[in-house]
Amino acid sequence: MMRSFDADDISEDRMIALRKRAELDSKYLITFIQNDASELKQSLNRLASTFAELANTYYRDEGRRIKTRVEKKNTNSVELNIRYCFKVAVYAEFRRDWAEALRFYEDAYHTLRERDPPWLAWFLCGQEASKDDWDDNKLPATQRLVEIKTVAEQLHFKISTLLLHGGKVIEAVKWFRQHNASYRKLVGAPEVMFLHWEWMSRQFLVFSELLETSSVTIQSSSSLVLGTADNPLTEWELIPAYHYQVVFFNF
C-alpha cells in the first residue's frame, strides 16, 4: 500500500521499484489518494477485493491440502480423520462453498458415529470392555462419552445450520430425527445420567432456535412431502414450538 495526497506525486518508476523490492504482483500494489474522497473509496474497495481474493486462495489451497490426507486415508486415527473433515468444511465455509462444507461435516459426523468401538457396546448394553479396548482412549468412560457427544453436537449444529441456510427444512428435520435417535440411548453410567438428559434437552432447544431464526419460510404441509410411509414426518415437526414443547414435557 502507498499513501499519497496527489496521484501525480507517484511516479511509475517508483512503483516499479517498490514492486520489485517487495516481489509483488502489480495488482497487489494499491495507492491511497487521501485528499480525494472518490479515489480513496475506490482504493478501499480494491483493498477489500484484494484481501478477499488472497483469503479465498489461501483457504482453497489449505482445504485441498487437508482433503488429500482424508482421501488418501494416511492415518488410522478416527480422531484425526474427524478433525481433517471438520477443517476442510470450515475452510469451505470461509469460501462460501456450502455444498462442500455440508459434505465434509456429514462425513465427520458419520465417521464419529460409525466407528462402533468397544465403548458403544458398554454404554448401550452394560458390557465390560477390556483394558486393551481402552488403551487407545486413555480417558475414563464418562469423559470419553461426554467428548464424543460434544463433537456430535457441534457437527449436528453445523449441518442443521447449512441445511436451513439452503432452504432444506425437511432435510434438516430428518437430520435432527436421526441425530436424536442415534444418541438417545447413549445414557452412560447411572450416577451421571443427568448429563445425558441435559445434553438431549439442549439438542431440542438449539434445533428449535435454529428453526425459529431460519430465514426460510415454511410452506403449508399440503405442498411438502413429509417423509415416507415407513418414516413419516408430521407438520408439527416443522414448527419450533413443537420442539420446545418436547423439552418441557419430556426432559
Image (tube, grey):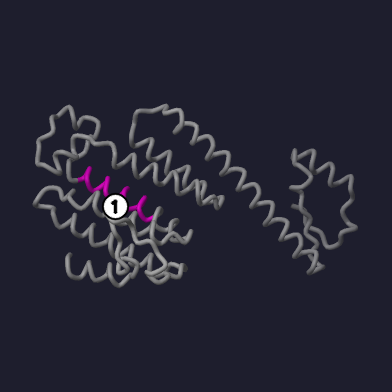
Identity of the residue drawn at 33% across and 56% down:
174
Identity of the residue drawn at 51% across and 52% down:
98
Return the residue at label 1.
179
Locate residue 138, reporting x and y percent.
Answer: 22, 34
State the count of labels.
1
Front-lying residue, 200 or 134: 200
Identity of the residue drawn at 23% across and 58% down:
200
Q: Tell me the quarter of the picture where residue 37 sits.
A: bottom right
Identity of the residue drawn at 30% across and 61% down:
233
Q: Secondary structure at mark 1?
A: helix
- Judged left or right of residue 191, residue 240 is right
Locate residue 50, reporting x and y percent.
Answer: 69, 51
Front-lying residue, 166 or 141: 166
Q: Tell me the quarter of the picture where residue 158 sits.
A: bottom left
Label 1 neighbour load within 10 Å: few <14, some 14-19, many 20+: some
- Judged left or right of residue 113, residue 211 is right
Up-down relation of residue 16 to residue 33 (above or below): above
Up-down relation of residue 220 to residue 172 (above or below): below
* Magenta stretch contains residue 148: yes
Please report the bounds of the magenta region as a residue range: 143-157
**Secondary structure character of the magenta stretch overall:** helix
Q: Amino acid at mark 1?
A: His
Locate residue 7, reporting x and y percent.
Answer: 87, 59
